[in-house]
Image (spheres, rainbow, N blue to C red):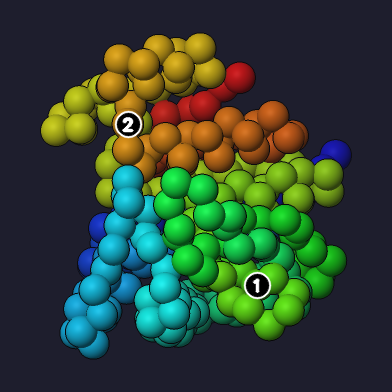
């Protein structure tokens, strides 16, 4: 029987607010078995960029990463946010290590090709190297992964944290029974973004397409769900979209994805 591995991506307002992040880390630390935490931090990067006089440019919710912006996201994701989470896990007697895709040659990516939009130094994942990360996990170390990758030629790249979580989940699905959760401030995928009680408890690919077509599901939720369904298709056992509360009681609250 395969050992269980839980991979959680935490983002949105959960990461930006000290109180909500502390609550999340406490809930995360109580999850049994092997764990990996992937984090975002886009709002923090935007705030720091503004203080430095660097304009943040977005297209359809995606950050344009020029040279100055790349410097900011490396500092914020790989430093400020990542090490804050690691330090908080240590206070709960959880051995943790902060990493990005360049560490241990963990995640390689290629610079996104310019089509309609030039996204700059944004990376699309090409490979995941699980060998040394596997050793850490089996020694009860919690890897905390910042959403940065590299191209193998010395260039760091800004990469979507939802994608990184899904690619890690797929890479580990051969060796573990993997459950993947996307944790943010909402209680799940909602039919009404202003009503936290409008959670879609079970979402399959057919219903997902219907909700996309009629506009119920849109914007930033689409890449999250695309990544989640891709993970299921590649052997991940469970994908949940929820908030910190949903991580309790066996991942029973929120939106469960189904093929």
Q: Earlier in the sequence, mark 2 or mark 1?
A: 1
Q: Give the residue number, with chain letter if any, for mark 1.
A: 150
Q: Where in the figure is residue 143, as x and y percent of width and height? A: 62, 70
Of the 4 image quadrants, the one containing the N terminus is top right
Q: Write the residue at 20% across / 84% down.
A: 53
- Residue at position x 42%, y 73% from top? 66
In the picture, the disc for residue 218 is 2
Q: Secondary structure at mark 1?
A: strand
Question: To which quarter of the image does residue 187 belong?
Answer: top left
Residue 193 placement (x, y as % from top left): 20, 32
**Residue occupying the point 37% across, 21% down:** 212
Q: Which mark is residue 164?
A: none
Marks 2 and 1, how far apart at CA: 29 Å
Position of residue 199 relative to residue 156, above or below, is above
Q: Looking at the rendering, in which quadrant would you find the C terminus?
A: top right
Give x and y (percent) for residue 142: 62, 69
Cβ atoms at labels 2 and 1 below 8 Å apart: no
Answer few, some or many: residues within 10 Å of disc 2's Cα (few below 14, many 20 plus, some between 14 and 19).
few
């Amino acid at each position: 029987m395969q050992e269980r591995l839980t991979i959680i991506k935490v983002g949105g307002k959960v990461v930006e607010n000290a109180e909500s992040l502390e609550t999340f880390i406490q809930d995360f630390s109580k999850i049994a078995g092997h764990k990996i935490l992937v984090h975002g931090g886009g709002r923090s990067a935007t705030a720091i960029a503004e203080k430095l006089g660097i304009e943040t440019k977005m297209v359809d919710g995606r950050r344009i990463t020029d040279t100055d912006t790349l410097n900011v996201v490396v500092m914020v994701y790989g430093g400020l946010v990542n090490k804050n989470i690691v330090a908080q896990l240590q206070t709960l007697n959880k051995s943790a290590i902060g990493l990005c895709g360049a560490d241990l040659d963990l995640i390689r990516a290629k610079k996104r090709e310019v089509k309609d939009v030039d996204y700059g130094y944004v990376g699309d994942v090409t490979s995941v190297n699980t060998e040394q990360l596997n050793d850490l996990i089996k020694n009860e170390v919690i890897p905390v992964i910042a959403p940065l990758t590299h191209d193998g030629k010395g260039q760091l790249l800004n990469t979507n944290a939802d994608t990184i979580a899904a690619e890690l989940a797929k890479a580990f699905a051969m060796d573990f029974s993997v459950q993947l959760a996307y944790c943010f401030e909402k209680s799940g995928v909602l039919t009404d973004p202003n009503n936290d009680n409008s959670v879609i408890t079970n979402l399959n690919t057919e219903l997902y397409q219907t909700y996309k077509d009629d506009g119920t599901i849109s914007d930033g939720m689409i890449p999250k769900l695309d990544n989640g369904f891709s993970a299921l298709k590649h052997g991940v056992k469970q994908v949940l979209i929820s908030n910190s509360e949903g991580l309790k009681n066996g991942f029973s609250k929120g939106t469960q994805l189904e093929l």
